[in-house]
Amino acid sequence: MIRIGTRSSKLALWQAYYIQDKLEAQGLQTELVTFETKGDKILDRALSKIGSKGLFTEELEQALHDGTIDIAVHSAKDMPSTLPEGLPLIAFTEREIACDVLVSKNKNLDLSANPVIGTSSTRRVALLKHYYPNVGVTNMRGNLQTRFKKMEDGVCDALLLAYAGVHRMEMDEYIVHKFPLDQFTPPVGQGTVAVQACPAQLGEEKVNIIRECCNHSETETRLLAERAFLKTLEGGCSVPVFAMATLEENQVSISGGIVSLDGKTLLKEVAQGPSSQAASLGEELAKSLLSQGGDKMLEEIKKQL
């Protein structure tokens, strides 16, 4: 029996069922165990104002340590760059389309018409200020269904979300704009489901079986580069940094950057190299950005958050 820990939102459950289906297809028995995390409970403040790491993961990680669950299923973009000791990510599923999208009931929404856009992401707010300084922004927390209801009630004209979540919730019909990846480069891990475990509790044999069922090697290589980039910058989900790696013929290309909270300064660069050096490429890219003034940008950003 594999006990799968997950948050209880509709999207988090989709991810858990996705992993459950992969495991049961190989004959494994599973059970879902649901949790409500700090990030789910505190909805009256922006994520950057709550002031702790692992907002959507801490309760599940404690359950892994306790042995209450065998694996935890997360959105990879929610995972801090530094994980608790003994709780590695053991699998990454094949990446969904990773771009950001605008969702609205108004099919004719025009970004040049000064709409009000709802988002809780500092990265998205900063990129909107950089590329679309005319638009209004309002903080929008809660699950996708809650946010959509707020939009229907007139709190905003559109929501800025990850394509993956919108698609998984079968709400594609409301997508009115897809942002190009070279502008709205996503946060590390967007579009991928991550499986976390405590190998000391689970055992090597089960870890290997779960990896065989769930891990997509190309996505894992890309995430190694991206997560090394994030760790070197000491960034988290509330800091406006971004990175996207691609893999072609055993060559990794990673584009990453930092944007100031007011959107006025955007620092971005690309690194390329063999897939065997994916993590090193991410680290080198981050160090290059830091040496070009990224260190001062991050220092200022953290003062303002």
Image (spheres, rainbow, N blue to C red):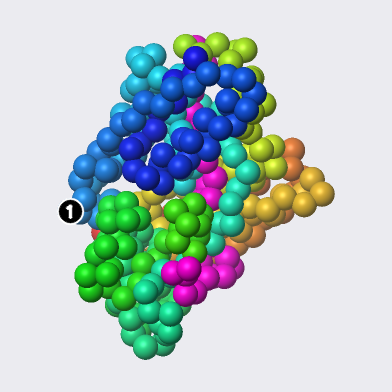
Label 1, secondary structure: give it.
loop
- Relative image position of residue 38 (x, y in whole percent): 25, 38
Residue 224's image quarter?
top right
State the residue lying farthest toward the right: 249
Whether the magenta-drawn stretch holds residue 197 is answered as yes
In the rendered view of the protein, which quadrant contains the C terminus? bottom left
Q: Residue at x 48, y 36 (%)?
A: 17
* Residue to which mark 1 is pinned: 44
Residue drawn at x 58%, y 52% is 96
Which residues fall within the magenta stretch?
Answer: 173-200
Side of 28 relative to 149 (left or right): right
Q: Is residue 23 left or right of residue 31?
A: right
The quadrant in which residue 53 appears is top left
**193 or 294: which is nearer to us?**
193
Q: Residues within 10 Å of mark 1 (few under 14, many from 20)?
A: few
Residue at (27, 43) in percent of width and height:
40
**Which percent across, then down, holds residue 284?**
61, 48
